[in-house]
Image: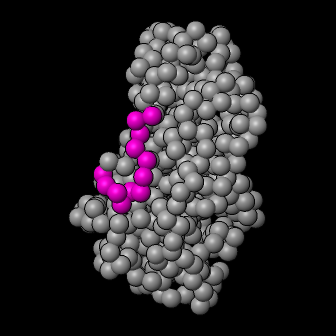
Amino acid sequence: MTDPGELPPFGHFIDGTFHPGGSGRVMDVINPSDGEPFARVVEGTAEDVDLAVTAATAAKPSWSARSPKERSEILHRIADRIEEHAEQLARLESANTGKPLLVSRDDVEQAVDTVRFMAGAARALTQAPAGEYVDQHLSVMVREPLGVIGVITPWNYPLLMAVWKIAPILAAGNTCVLKPSEQTPLTTLKLAELCADLLPDGVLNIVTGDGPVVGQRLADHLRVDMVALTGSVGAGRAVARTAATSLKRVHLELGGKAPVLVFPDADLAAAAATLRTAGFWNSGQECGAACRVLVHESVAAEFTEHLVREAGTLVMGDPAAGDDVEIGPLVSQAHFERVSRYLDNARAEGVSAALGGAPDDGRGYFVPPTVLIDVPAGAECTREEIFGPVVTVETFSEEQEAVRRANETPYGLSASVWTDDARRGLAVPGRLDFGTVWVNSHLVLASEVPWAGFKASGYGRDLSVYALDDYSRTKHVMHHRGR
């Protein structure tokens, strides 16, 4: 998938250059298509994080003092650089994560768009107007950067999630220390290499390593003003607990278990065709995946037939096999075993597989597209985030029941409603406790609109101008006009 000469330099990226770190230890990076190592990165230490935070702290005053126009121009050059190396980044992402090239290319395209949006939004921020709200006192509202932001990104979208964080953080005038997933660090390091000459030293720093060491140090470091994480609920809780000791802000985008409510008047064929992508994109390793279908009992058989036919046409294979591959391997041996256990447990609960249902027994971490039916309410596979190419199908009889069962999940990231009834299409989303609700669509994102969850899916907004708000603070300055 990628030439050895295209791998990023070895080391952490700190203060504008790559450093070997202080541990002397390395971690293998595995190709999930065959389970073999193909690269190595440094196993970081708390001391490495300290060096990166020191660099970010030193760079903070001059970077935050730049005008929005200056920061915007640099971000546009970063977007240009990503675009110039789009195919190289896509191939590296596929080699590291097992993503099909069509997914990796889409990630790179979205990354470019995100940087360009934030570059523009940084110049168009609005706030409460200055005014004399108290007699003889002029109030001015000032938006300021928070300072040094610690970032922890996940393994499922290494490049895109890094950009979702880096772009608004830098646009708002902050500096950044980022820990990529130890499983998928390569495109984040490559991004740092590609942009090293565009950013002042210390503005962006990358430290590789394990969460309990590098992530923990970011969360408890007294000179880190905020920690932003995209990851599991467990990781979010750990970061929030640690960050609470220093009362630093926390930005969390955690898991999801998106219900898909299919009513009897819906276009069943269109819903199933959408779920072919929305349920299985990135091999289901997607927190907004359309993974839990609640379909009205009167149309359940017809809808399931459509869904099985659609999902059955997906092409599974090694991303290196070509552009036709739509489902790649899961990211790691551990995650492969985790998804496999969920499938075993479903069978033990009496759940049937209308498609797939068991892991591939060949080389690599492959699980075929799976549609589970005869799923009883409350089954484990309807409650837990499987995070694989698995879609479950349950039935309901009344609208109120569908809404109640959809809301029973502890997650609150996204959901969709499928209906041709205008009243229902307007009313039901308001009763669903999810940060994004699509109507007759699913998993459609845009840089202009926020991506944020409720409940166990965390708090904090990615994308849109709301992300810039999250990475800023508001100061009130009041002038006595008579003195």
Residue 420 location, x and y as percent? 44, 11
Residue 57 location, x and y as percent? 52, 77
Most common SS among magenta residues: loop
Image quarter (top left, top right, bottom left or bottom right) of the N terminus = bottom left
Name the foreground residue: 278 vs 237.
278
Residue 354, magenta (yes or no) = no
Determine which quarter of the picture holds residue 375.
top right
326 relative to 187, above or below: above
Q: Which residues are magenta?
A: 312-323
Residue appearing at x 55%, y 16% in the figure: 301
Left or right? Give the position of 110 relative to 154: left
Left or right? Give the position of 338 relative to 362: right
Residue appearing at x 56%, y 22% in the figure: 261
Residue 48 location, x and y as percent? 58, 83
Residue 313, magenta (yes or no) = yes
364 relative to 291, above or below: below
- Does any portion of residue 204 appear in the rendered image? no
